[in-house]
Amino acid sequence: MATPKRIYLAGPEVFFPATEHQAIVAEKKRLLREYGFEGIDPLDTELAFSGDQAKPDRGQRIYQANRELMDSCDGIIANLTPFRGISADPGTVYEVGYMIGQGKPAFGFTLDSRRYRERMGSIGLDKLGHTIEDFEMSDNLMIEGGINDSGGQLFVAEQPGEHPFFSAELFRRCVRALAHA
């Protein structure tokens, strides 16, 4: 029996309460298994910290553990729904770029159907007078452009999901596209 391809699951879910995170990740992993993939969550690594370990050292260990997980994976599906602002979670965006940089396919989804410019407002400048890009893309052009160049695709919700940050139907679309990539 062939080993299933490992798919890194990136997104802001790692910041959700434990039960909420676990429920969403369990559903993602179940959907991936239906197509013969193994889902790998950033929290699949068990890290133990000493009480006196400095917070920057803890952060560095988490980064290294997540990078090792990404290195062990064959692709990524990222939740790019805007988080704490008008754009995707910056850690998730880094993970997408890291995987693309390794030549691995990246797929993503967002439950916000508005384009990037729409989320900033209707005028072409921010409150500081800086230009807001307007390429009719779901997020910054580097995110969507990189996903497209990797052979992947960014899926945009047409209706709300069962959670503000998750839709099984939308995630399944990513998995189905990955299976045919």
Image (tube, rainbow, N blue to C red):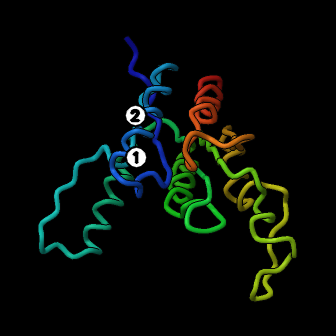
Can you give x and y, in whole percent of width and height, for residue 134 in the image?
84, 65
Badge 1 amino acid: Glu
- Judging depth in this view, the residue of 56 and 129 nearest the camera is 129
Can you give x and y, in whole percent of width and height, for residue 159 in the image?
71, 41
Residue beneath disc 1 = 20
Badge 2 amino acid: Ala
Residue beneath disc 2 = 26
For residue 89, which quarter of the picture?
bottom right
Left or right, 59 with reference to 162: left
Q: Residue at x 62, y 34 (%)?
A: 174
- For marks 2 and 1, give the CA distance: 10 Å
Q: Quadrant of the N terminus?
A: top left
Left or right, 49 with reference to 142: left
Q: Residue at x 66, y 66 (%)?
A: 86
Number of numbered discs overlaid on the protein picture:
2
Left or right, 70 with reference to 80: left
Q: Secondary structure at mark 1?
A: helix
